[in-house]
Amino acid sequence: MEMRLTNSLTGQVEALAPKNPPLVRMYTCGPTVYDRATIGNFRTYAVADLLRRTLEALNLEPKYIMNITDVGHLTGDNLGDADTGKDRMEEAAAREAVTAWDIAKRYADQFLADYEALNLLPPDKWVKATDHIPDQIALVKTLEEKGYAYRTSDGVYFDTTKFPAYGALSTLDKIKEGARVGANPEKKNPRDFALWKFSQPGEERQMEWDSPWGVGYPGWHLECSAMSMKYLGPELDIHLGGEDLRSTHHPNEIAQSEAVTGKTFVRAWVHVAFLQVDGGKMGKSLGNAYTLDDIKAHSASPAALKYLYYSAHYRSPLNFMWEGLAAAETAVERLRGYAAHWKKGEGHIAEDAHERFLAAMADDLQTTKALAEVWGMLRARDVSDADKAATLILCDEVLGLGLEDAATGKSAVEIPAEVRKLVAAREDARKSGDFAAADRLRDDIAEKGFDVKDTATGATITARKGEI
């Protein structure tokens, strides 16, 4: 069974053709750790994890690298020119009255905690921009030696006129003159981009390094080329990222990488569509840039968020609504219930059902079709309960919903703090003899999707189970 993906470079669904199968060299653009990653950000990382798991299920061997950007990503990126504005790390440091290095550690640690909570498999290596400054400087030196770089008063820039294929990924009309703001008159071409930025006189930067061109810091695009080629070689099989990176960041990666190596940088470019909220944009200024904490505060599990991601194809915009998340939570709870209660004895894999599930995933990650195959198998009358549980758990090796934990008796559900407070209040009511209040609190707990049971050793909390 072959893996097929929508290649953004061609706009076609194509068979994946890794250069050295079964090895698949895969890179994902990770977060800029100046703030908490949102559930919109995590849609991309969940899709990357899903792809990685699918490749493994198809007996391929992904070598997976993800970066963490902790310097050089400027605020001008929001306005169309990633070479202008303030460094996001430095700006966050001023906002929170700590150092830029503190910001990097704080939000990188938070990102990794959220990543783990979502049951996303860690890459083979996390790579940080600030750990690879010499590699980035070496890349700029090579570009300069090959005639692709030139200096201005504020940095070293890539000359896009020297790279005729520039813009093929996003099409030139999306990055032509006029698409950017605050044009730098020293640029030879408006589409040229910074490889190295100089620290300006009077500017107080906490993150800066010596270089052959002067003290400064790397341009945002540089790190991904330097680090991906260091760990995966000059030719990647898959490069994945959010669709917001398609217009400039990824075309710049292609230009600087291929200018150095003369080889095709990436065989398949995979881009994940935006997550909308209530039919509109998500943004911090709009107050709807939700994080994993917001999900938990609504008595939903990280697995429910993943299930919601799977409710639309990764290339299609997904509309986030709290009602949809609640429905996803119910679906996940039902799956956990089946995994836990049907795993009795040694079940066998329902091969036909699993084959159809895997075929849907191999066909450009058709998650809605794959989930339909799962539910169809669970309803089948000619498949035993034990076989259903075994097949469901095998499918979950790709879905990553944590169903194996449910089947083995491990806690697969995080009890929200709100529910724990209600349980504690109910326990106090019972101890004081106010059983009417205790009953009301039990109902409140049930409305939030949990059952409370009184035992000799205290109250236990379990998630409510549904039916197919």
Image (cartoon, rainbow, N blue to C red):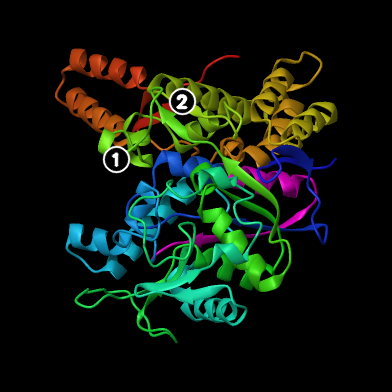
- For residue 319, which numbered disc appears in the image? 2
In the rendered structure, find residue 284 and report the number of the disc placed on it: 1
SS of the residue at dot 1? helix
Residue 119 in sight? no
Whether 391 is drawn above or below 132: the answer is above
- Say which element carries label 2: strand
At 34% from the left and 49% from the top, the residue drawn is 36
The quadrant the N terminus occupies is: top right
**171 up-or-down from 351: above or below:** below
- The answer to whether residue 190 is left or right of residue 35 is right
> Which mark is first along the chain, 2 or 1?
1
- Alpha-carbon span between mark 1 and mark 2: 17 Å
Closer-to-camera residue (113/280): 280
In the picture shown, does residue 298 fall above or below 55?
above
Identity, as a three-letter code, of the amino acid under mark 1: Lys
Q: What crowding class fits label 1: few (fewer than 14 Cα within 10 Å), some (14-19), or many (20 or more)? A: few
Q: Position of residue 158 (x, y in %)?
A: 52, 68
Relative to 54, is 30 on the left or the right?
left
Mark 2 residue type = Asn
Magenta segment boundaries in residue numbering? 47-70
Label 2 Cα neighbours within 10 Å, binned few <14 / some 14-19 / many ≥20: some
